[in-house]
Image (cartoon, rainbow, N blue to C red):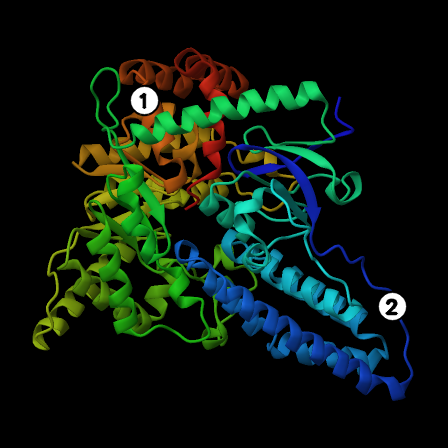
Amino acid sequence: MARAHLYGTPVSPGIALGTIHFLHTEPVPDKRRIVPSEVEAEQQALRQALEAVREDLRQAMNKVPEDLQEYREIISAQVEMTQDPKLVDSTCQLIAREQVGAAWALNCVVTQLCEVFRNMDDPYLRDRAQDIRVVGMRILNRLSGATDAVQAGDNLILASEDISPADIMDLDVHSIRGIVTREGGLTSHTAILARGMHIPALVCVTNLLVAARDGDKVIIDGLGGNVLISPSEEDTLHYSRRATAYSAWQVAARNTAHWPADTTDALRVGVLANIERPHEARELSQVGADGIGLYRTEFAFLRETLPTEEELYAEYATVVQDAPGRAIIRTLDCGADKLTRAQQAFKEPNPALGLRGIRFTLHHQDLFRAQLRALLRAGRLGKLSILLPMISTVEEVRSVRRLIQEVDQELTMRNVPHASRVPLGVMIETPAAVLITDVLARECDFFSIGSNDLIHYLMAIDRNNRHVAYLGDAMHPAVIRSLKRIIDSGHREGLSVSACGELSSDPFGVVLMLGMGIDSLSVSPSFLPGIKHLIRKLDAQACTELATQVLLSMDIPACKHMVNEMLQKVLGHELSFMTSAVMGGHA
């Protein structure tokens, strides 16, 4: 029996056995009082620590392998953070004002900045608190003279409060078998890194920093969310067999990823990819993607300066040309919670219900026109569709149509090559959009269901509030009936309907949406082969009959039991491998 059995949230599937090593283990610094004559010395110590960390990060950036080049941007952002006045000046001011040591002052400022980001509604921005935290931990380590040196060896399980790409680059990446952290989320750097490196990872692990010690033997289960500290021989044997079975399943799924996703009764379902970086498009043919179901454009706008039209065009052109099929590019889904310094003039107290998505871009039309020009120009290079987020009214779609027409005329007058006709779709993610899908279907070319926000708004919940998390249930009758209404409304007008939220990666969601007639699903590339494998085992008619029963029921546990019974019958032991797919594809 293991000495301790911990639980966490799986963010990268797989099973790993190894030796745990802790990074950034410095305790919370004491509030050390200083005299006025020591203030300057403490401020200088802080600046020296910042410079040392800055140099460490630059060295880590230079070590990033060719196949992980996107993480240079993350480390580069952390380098910039070490020069951010909000971090540096605020800490120096606190040292002088409170007459306290640099370590305590820095910890206070870092904690405050993290809290600002963690209170944001957007999961990507919320997880950026991790950048601030890991940079803060590095600086604290420098101030204390501590080191994160790792003993040479294989089969390392990295553990920390948080882990960043720079931490990984400081080590021999080939020796890392898994990652566990106390903090983090599905879109944290830990999750993204682990999935990119194809190693198991768990975040939000309970009691991690208390129960585990450096050098402990450990098993991490990225399928079931388990962490076993000092496992028994029986535990080791069980998980070794499970790891072997999972690896064999992965190989089988990858080997058949290029096969079409046809059900046993010959219904073809499109399986597309959700991506957010241009370079990802050229890798999609390896996982059997039929195209790009969601390309997120926000990240170009999260830098210190706004991107130019030429920069956007170059980005979208790469995506369209490298996509294995059609590329559906979502216009800026950026609200007041995502503003960079270049846009700080506009702020809101409740961004989730404020000027975000299409509301934001219609309000900032110069920015929107530049993006539309770049999209139309890229549209002549391949199959491109434009997707509008956060639609609530028909007039919003009509307004965009008018803008596109104006942009088309402008480009024509300037003799700029572009596509004059690009399919236009809308994200269905608000209750208002659900209730007017019949009208919206006559104003656009396709529907895409953003299940994450749809559930969030339908159930009137804050996804970050653990007290109401139980309401975020995709099996709630309101959610199920909304999905059916969207799909039926689209089909009545001859529109294709896809889904690109987490529900598309969840076997339960796949069964029900397939039974309702969904045309395509868009998921994280990591989970695409597994979803295609699942679809090829399902009978569409049986899914339709099951979906009908679920639609008529008010009993959520009974519905879950019915769907689980079908999945157990179809997948058997593979179901435990498939359930980890729920981690992919947030929209």
Q: Is residue 236 visible?
A: yes
Residue 319 disc label: none
Q: Measured from the top left, where is residue 331 in percent x and y? A: 31, 58
Give the foreground label among 1 and 2: 2
Q: At label 1, which amino acid type do we have?
A: Gly
User: Residue shown at 43%/24% (left/top)?
Assistant: 248
Q: At label 2, which amino acid type do we have?
A: Lys
Q: Is residue 6 left or right of residue 275?
A: right
| C-alpha separation, residue under disc 1 versus residue under disc 2 | 60 Å
Residue identifier under label 1: 515
Q: Measured from the top left, where is residue 461 in percent x and y? A: 56, 43
Residue 232, located in which quarter of the rendered image? top right
Q: Identify which residue, 365 or 72, lies in the foreground.
A: 72
Residue identifier under label 2: 31
| Residue contact between numbered discs 1 and 2, judged by CB atoms under 8 Å | no
Q: Identify which residue, 337 or 48, lies in the foreground.
A: 48
Number of marks in picture: 2
Q: Measured from the top left, where is residue 115 in percent x and y? A: 66, 60
Tag 2 or tag 1, which sits nearer the N-term? 2
Residue 508, located in which quarter of the rendered image? top left
Q: Is residue 546 left or right of residue 164?
A: left
Q: Is residue 411 left or right of residue 178?
A: left
Location of residue 418 with respect to 234 vertically, above or below: below
Q: Quadrant of the N terminus?
A: top right
